[in-house]
Amino acid sequence: MHFLQKCCLYVQVRNKSGRSVRIEKVECRFQSESGLDAYIASQTHFENLEQGYLSNPIPIEFEADLALRAYTNYYHILIYYDDGNKRVFDYDPQRFLVFYPLGHAHQQFFISHKDPQDTNIGRQLAGFLNKLGFIGYLSEDDHRPGLDLWKEKIPAAVAASIGVVILWTSNAAKDPAKILRELEMAKSNKKPLIMAPEKGVSTPKKFPKKIEYFRFKHPLTDGELKRLALSIHATYRRGGYS
């Protein structure tokens, strides 16, 4: 399966409890990326089962969310039922699904951010972009010994990118020199700018005024970074950044 694809997993339940039960809901819990909340797909399903009986197939529909761990992803099933008391049965089928990025990453976005305070934020965004078929470039993760950061690595990375994402946070506002330098490189290379200021953080006068910013609705959370990645992907599909 590919990320963002509509998926469906079917579950059947056989009653071996020794008594009649009523199935009420089925959940499928997948592995999420480190630091992200567990991803849960569920389906309400009411069905009475006598001892030994097998339920109808129960479809659990979900979208392959960016929070899911890429590639091999083990899952387990939770059955919510009532046999006179509300109970939950946790079943590990010891099986997995495989979630692939949307394509082979060849188009790159340069992620300008405050290093090291916002490195984890930048890496989370890069991970989401990777699942959407892009490369998210962070200069501190470019391990090529012997190259000058400001003369060789960063200028080349900006030039090779189809867009530059500016993560403007409270950390960046306290010491903006590096980000403003990368902003000027992006302008001189005529790269599209994705301006993403944190809510409540004022932006410098040097920031462009005639483009639409991506406005974070809340402080920088995984959900907000995922929303940014999806917005970039949607703009790219509509012909943006070309």
Image: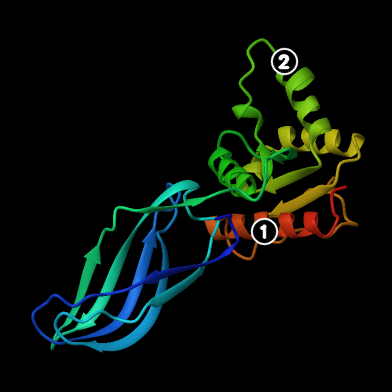
Residue 75 shows which numbered tag? none
Residue at mark 2 to residue at mark 1: CA–CA distance: 33 Å
Residue 148 shows which numbered tag? 2
How crowded pointer 2 is (Cα within 10 Å; few <14, some 14-19, many 20+) is rated as few
**Quarter of the figure with residue 179:** top right
Earlier-in-chain disc, 2 versus 1: 2
**Quarter of the figure with residue 135:** top right
Depth check, front residue: 1 or 169: 1
Residue 141 in the image: above or below residue 49? above
How crowded pointer 1 is (Cα within 10 Å; few <14, some 14-19, many 20+) is rated as some
Discs 2/1, front: 1
Give the secondary structure at mark 2: loop
Q: Callout 1, which amino acid?
A: Leu
Q: In x, y percent, where is residue 221?
A: 54, 56
Residue 38 in the image: above or below residue 180? below
Write the residue at 76% across / 51% down.
195
Write the residue at 66% across / 40% down.
113
